[in-house]
Amino acid sequence: MSNPDVIPTVDLSPFFTTGDDEGKKNAKDLIHQACSTYGFFRVVSHGVPLELMTRAMKVSKTFFEFPDEEKLKSSPVSGSPLPAGYNKQPAHLADKNEYLMMFPPKSTFNALPTNPSEFKEVDEDLFSSFVNTAQLLETIVAECLGLPPTFLQKFNDDRNWDLMVALHYFQATDIENIGNSEHEDENIITILLQDEVGGLEVRKDDEWIPVTPIEGTLIVNRGDIVQVLSNDKYKSATHRVVRTKGRDRYSYAFFYNLEAEKWVEPLPEFSTSIGESPKYKRFVYKDYQALRMRNKTHPPSRSEDVINITHYSVPN
Ligand code: OGA
Ligand code: NI
């Protein structure tokens, strides 16, 4: 029987000790391979405590089980660059989920629930823990690309733009099961914590591969920024969530993200310096983010009109 868990598993423990150069090399080899093929990998010994992940899942379930009236008390505050707080996907959208979005713990845009009372503390702790893991992953990915380890850290040096989203996917019905339509993430690196239900899938060679849940592990995928910087060396993986009949699904997605005003374009290391033409025009990140948000709020009727990173492709 083939192994259903085909997403490579990477042990990050060598990066939390000194001296295990062999372990580090193995991890980097696996990540490079994963980034060049699936765009997805699983991490263990990632530094986020299991007990914190369990508590975070629990407070999220408790919150989403409340009636709308209670959840709407955490509606986004006006003036927020993105709708931080509680949101339900509008009924006309195929994606059937509701979510609670947050900026970093100190952000004045956050509209975090006060009920359950431990929600704020648990989610703020989870957010901070994800930042640490993302920071480590960012240095590893830079090295895997052949860049100095601190390259992405310097490029992505403003931590005010990271986002975490607690998601609740409703049960599938007899006629529809879309939870999160196929897409690529627009940021730098995404870390995902999912419950035991399953439904996340990644596309590889025109096949949808299930990203099966394994307790204590986290799923990592890279976003469009890395694809553009690396001039397609590391492509961002297409993924989706399919809902299950009879089961609600909960997840947390952490988007390690770039400052809004930042310009993004292929690095010379992957284009002009090696005699290859840049595959993307340069753009300001916030413009792309706005277009992507519009996909959600004003979904185009034709799927080919949904904006993704090819919007900035240079015709060859
Ligand atoms: C996303 C996403 C997957 C999940 O929010 O971009 O792909 O399992 N989420 O919730
Ligand atoms: Ni995604």
Image (cartoon, helix red, strand yellow):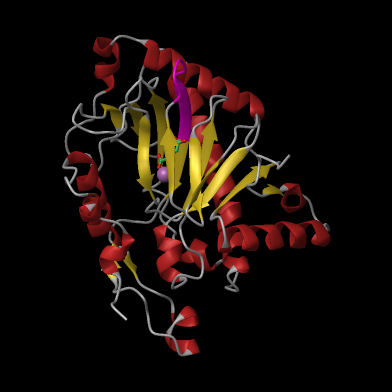
Please report the bounds of the magenta region as a residue range.
244-252
Q: Is residue 220 left or right of residue 237?
A: right
Residue at screen point 45% across, 58% down:
236
For the C terminus, the quadrant is bottom left
Is residue 40 visible in this depiction of the protein?
A: yes
> Could you tell me residue 23's position as x and y percent?
80, 56
> Could you tell me residue 258's position as x and y percent?
38, 56
Residue at screen point 48% across, 24% down:
121
Would you identify the image quadrant in which residue 68 lies? top left
Image vertical order of residue 143 relative to residue 98, above or below: below
Image vertical order of residue 62 relative to residue 133, above or below: above
Would you identify the image quadrant in which residue 267 lies? bottom left
Judge whether residue 249 is colored magenta. Answer: yes
Residue at screen point 16% across, 42% down:
298
Identify which residue, 58 or 202, lies in the foreground.
Answer: 202
Residue at screen point 40% across, 61% down:
225
Judge whether residue 154 is colored magenta. Answer: no
Identify which residue, 47 or 181, lies in the foreground.
Answer: 181
For the N terminus, the quadrant is top right
Q: Quadrant of ligand 1?
A: top left
Q: How many marks?
A: 0
Q: Is residue 9 left or right of residue 159?
A: right
> Could you tell me residue 226's position as x and y percent?
46, 63
Is residue 117 visible in this depiction of the protein?
A: no
> Could you tell me residue 58's position as x and y percent?
52, 17
